[in-house]
Amino acid sequence: MLLSQIRNQDGSITVVAREGKEAYAVRGATSVYDLALDCIRSGRNDLAAHVTALGLGPALDLDGAYDEGRLLPPITHPDPAHLHLTGTGLTHLGSAATRDAMHQKAAAQEEEKLTDSMRMFRMGLDGGKPANGAPGVQPEWFYKGNGYSVAAPGGVLKSPVFADDAGEEPEIAGVYVIGDDGTPFRLGFALSNEFSDHVMERQNYLYLAHSKLRPASFGPELRIGALPDDIRGTSRIRRDGETIFEKPFLSGEANMSHSIANLEHHHFKYEVFRQAGDVHVHMFGTATLSFADGVSTRPGDEFEIEAAAFGLPLRNRLAVDGGARDRRVQIHAL
């Protein structure tokens, strides 16, 4: 089942469920957030069954709503400060050939000659998927922002004027709501564009935290249930109607050095991320970047990320925030 949200002209939200090609309104649902909390509080703990129990209303034109700019992210929070955007890096193997090459390179080098990134990658290969269910090695982790940093599907990804680059990262994100007792509940998974500044990051790996403080987008649809083991999608960039970049991307645990359970554990082990009612959108990493192929994006470029298992593709247009690059933020003393 796929869930999405349409913004109505009066500001209300219609929750949409889809299995196959037809999309229908979910009866009595005012938002995916409220739907999830109602499901948790009912004790059913099965979101798809909860939707089925509520029943479906009239058929809807999801593509038309997308074209009209009325699709919202597949979950929003009434207070955007309580939606957290985070992610993990160095988690994907890429192709089998890339995996083997990186593993052999790591094994062949002396420990003191490894870069920090290669060492972190090797740690994931060796300990990111523990067989006994115990926590594995912790991954690289970063913070991106809160609900104010989320761009809706079809909306603008706005790069700050001081940025050195504005590049896409096609990823899968886990979507979670924290129950009243602090228990994290996974609703499902969505496509995401973990938009980043790769030029800044390349200057010095300690700039990674700065490079990730950028907006992101996810959706348009939320896939309920387990994540497919092998996800194959496509990442594109269009400029003036022409495709200037197109490349497949792989995700799912078959293409990762960490299990999803391990990545989830190392995020939610922190009590601060288990606050009742909060929403978390946690991005699991990628092995495909247009930046790595020498592409330099421009304002007006359109990013498109698609994978058949996740419904509609995720599209966003690039813009740059206005103002002078060297403008200093004025701080006022009280």
Image (cartoon, rainbow, N blue to C red):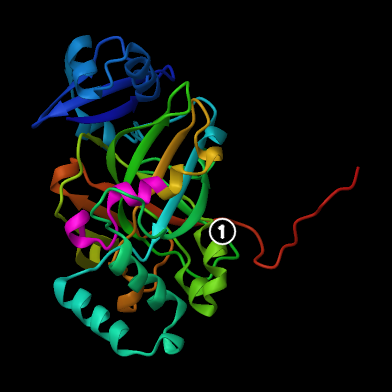
In the figure, 80 relative to 201: above or below? above
Q: In the picture, which quadrant includes the C terminus?
A: top right
**Does residue 114 lie above or below 218 as drawn?**
below
User: Residue tagged by mark 1?
Assistant: 160
What residue is drawn where x is 24% and y is 22%? Answer: 46
Picture residue at 15% right of the left edge, 44% below the top = 309
Q: Is residue 55 visible to us here?
A: no
Which residues make up the magenta segment? 250-265
Q: Amino acid at mark 1?
A: Pro
Residue 53 visible: yes
Label tally: 1
Residue 240 in picture, x, y percent from top left: 30, 62
Q: Residue 220 sits in which quadrant?
A: top left
> Height in image: 108 above or below 294?
below
Nearer to me, 319 or 160: 160
Which residue is found at the position 23% from the left and 54% from the top? Answer: 131
- Residue 29 position, x and y percent, is 32, 14
> Is 332 part of what is drawn in magenta?
no
Is 288 on the left-hand or right-hand side of 58?
A: right
Q: Is residue 252 magenta?
A: yes
User: As drawn, is 306 to the left or to the right of 209?
Assistant: left
Label 1: element kind:
loop
* Residue 139: percent from left, percent from top: 41, 60
Residue 324 figure quarter: bottom right
At 30% from the left edge and 68% from the top edge, which residue is drawn?
126
Q: Is residue 3 left or right of residue 204?
A: left
Screen quadrant of the N terminus: top left
